[in-house]
Every structure is written in C-alpha cells, then in structure tokens.
Image: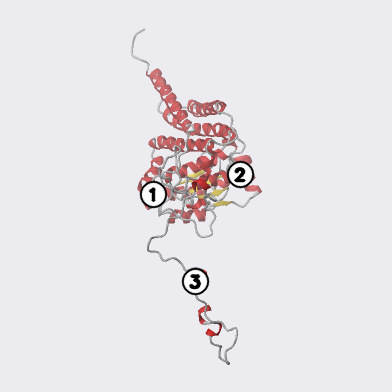
Amino acid sequence: MSGAPDPTRTRRRSLGAGLVGLLAAGQLLGCATTPYSFAAHGETDLTLKLREGESQIERGVPNAWIDGFGHYFFSLPTKLILLDWKVDNHDISPEVEKSLEEYLHANGLCNTKVRLNQYAPGGEWQRLFKNREMPGGWRYTLGLLAVSFYTILPERLLAGFPFIGGGDHYNPFTNTVSIYSDRRPVVLHEGGHAKDFASWQNRHWMGVYAALRSIPLLGLVVALWQEAVATNDALSWELATAGSRESKTAYRTLYPAYGTYLGGTAQTAASFFVGGWILYAVQYGIVVVGHVAGQTRALFVRDRDAGLEPDVVEGPPAPGLAVGAAGSTEAAAPRPPCMQRIEAVPAALPAEDAIPAPPPPQDAVPAPAEDAVPRPPEDANPAPPEDAVPGTPSSEGL
C-alpha cells in the first residue's frame, strides 16, 4: 500500500545507520602501528618542573579499609563492564609502575606527575596554580572544577563507581596521571593522553583542546578522538616493546574500554530518536561488541617473545646516530634529559679502520730530546740559609 513513509521507521533506520557508523569508526581507530612514533614536541620551558628531590611517581599509603571498600564494592560496576578484576583494584604492582615510567621517559615526559592510588588534593591544587603551560583562563575555570571534583569525590575510594566515581585519568590542567588499576594497558593509555597533550606546543591550543571535550555534543566527538589517540599509542607501544601476551591483553582491555565511550556517545545520539530501556541496550550493547572485537583482534596477534622495536624503551636515538634505513644520515632527535642513559661507545676502532694522526704543521718546533737538556752542575744550587725550616711548603703549593 502506497503512502507517506512511516516516520518511526525512518528514525530507526537513521539511528541504526548512525550507530553502525560510530561503531565502525571507533573500531577502525584502535589498531597498533609501527614504527613507533615518539612525542612530537614534548615538554617546553613552561612545563611545570618537579621540585628538587620530588619523585615523579608517588604512591598512596596503603589503607586496608579504604582500598578494600574501593576494590570490593565501589569499583564492582566497572569491573563487571570491562570483565576485569584488576581494574580499579587500588593495588598497582611494581611491574606496571615501571612500564608507565619507561613509557613517559622514552617520550620525554619527565615532569608529568604520576599518582598511584594516591589522594593528594593539596598537591593537585598547587600544580593547578603553578602550571603555566596551561593558560590561566582554562585553569581557573575548567581546571578549578576538575580539581574540585577530585577533592570532594576522592577516587581513592570511589574509583569505578558510576556517575561520581571516575577512575584512572589524566588531568591536563595539572599535568597529572592518576592510576588506580593494576593493568599495564590502562596505565599506558593514560600516559598516552599526557603524550597527546604534550604534542600541542602552542599552550593556547592545548587549552582549547582540553576545553573542547566539555562542550555538549561536540565534546562527545572530541572525547572519542582523544581516547582513540591514547588507545592507538598504547597498542603501538605494546607492539614495539612487549611480547604477544601483552599485546593480546591490551586489545582485550582497551577495545571494550573504548566501547564505553563509544556506547555513551551512541546513547546520547539515540536519545533524540528513542527512549527508555533501548538507550541502555544501545550503550551496553556496544560495550559487548567492543569485547567481541577485542577478543577477535587478539586472535590475529602473531606469537612473539619480545617487541618488534625493543630499542624504543631507550627513547629517541642520541644526536649524531643514524636513523631509518642503513646508511641514512638524517639527524636524530636528542634523548630526553630524564633518561640519564649513557650511550654505548666502541672501545677502539679496528686496525684497518684506524684513523692516522694528522702530521704536525711545518712550523712546529720539535720537542728537544731528553738528553739534549743540559743538567746544571751539582754545586749550582745554593745551600739553604741556616735559619730555614726544613719541610715548609712554598707559597705556590698552597
């Protein structure tokens, strides 16, 4: 029967097409690339420096009651969504800590503060006021709100709880990474956010980049982009520095985690067409698809014992070393100062490659032979006066 098209069916088709597009775009963004790309710019003169003697990575004092409630109660919803018991478990292992430290140092992020299961509102307020790398207009508006929420709703206890709990995150207004999960892919992902913001050498654009995420609707798209950048970098780092086991874990963790952002965006878009339980079905359905995609992608990771580019952990090549293809003379970026690693220098050149010393200039005066210097007669030196004190040093020896 002919007639006007059903508006309900048209809206559902538009919704379906939009969700498929969002899902496809999100999953295509999450892939590892090689060779690994270091931070484009890194830190600047305006970067807030750590105080003398201040540790870049700090841990909160263990508290069985607070950490227990956080791990076994408040973070259960997030654990269930991501199907990972170590998410927001408030117990970060030294191995996970080291992986984040290596990542930050290799990318020249020597002054990015890292707080492992630590609640430090005083320190964060100080960093907010002193971080001149972020323009004051953004720090004293959005940054003020961010640190206020950090202070009022302590993630040390509430991390992983829906709506108010937050969790692992990077705060660009204080240049601080806060970690509550004992998962290597998660901490690398948050480090990826720090690297992403450091790539904005212009501080004003850095502030705009942070603020765009807070704009209604547009902020959802910006958030998807920022999360994709951090996810890609974490996956690429694992491909370059770790074995296949770590890469598989990264896909299984980061794909559904990205699915939570994609699902939230899809839910907002769907709210213009439908309502009720369908919105939750859309949101968590995409998370399920993220799990399936992560598990599937992990199956295609080739077995390997180590990363494809193990030297990446050492940071960019030192000045003067060739990069790229063999024989290339392209100038290499200097190593970050926080690496404090000594370059390996060959002990000696092979005999056939030895470089002969240049001949002396023609007008050079040859040194006299040892026997050519006349010796004074034995009685040439006068005897010391009778009142001289033996063993007293001369003024030249002081």
In the displayed structure, would residue 359 be above or below residue 167? below
Q: Mark 2 or 1, which is nearer the eye?
A: 2
Which residue does the numbered mark 3 point to in the structure image? 372
Q: Quadrant of the N terminus?
A: top left
Three-letter code, disc 1: Trp
Q: What x and y, as percent, mark residue 346?
A: 53, 49
> Under tag 2, what secondary structure?
helix
In the displayed structure, would residue 56 be above or below residue 216? below
Which residue does the numbered mark 1 point to in the structure image? 138
Q: What x and y, as percent, mark residue 47?
A: 43, 53
- Residue 303 visible in the picture: yes
Three-letter code, disc 2: Glu
Whether label 2 touches label 1, CB < 8 Å: no
> Under tag 1, what secondary structure?
helix
If you read the primary sequence from the N terminus, does the residue marked by circle 1 or circle 3 appear first? 1
The extreme right residue here reads 64
Give the Cα distance between marks 2 and 1.
35 Å
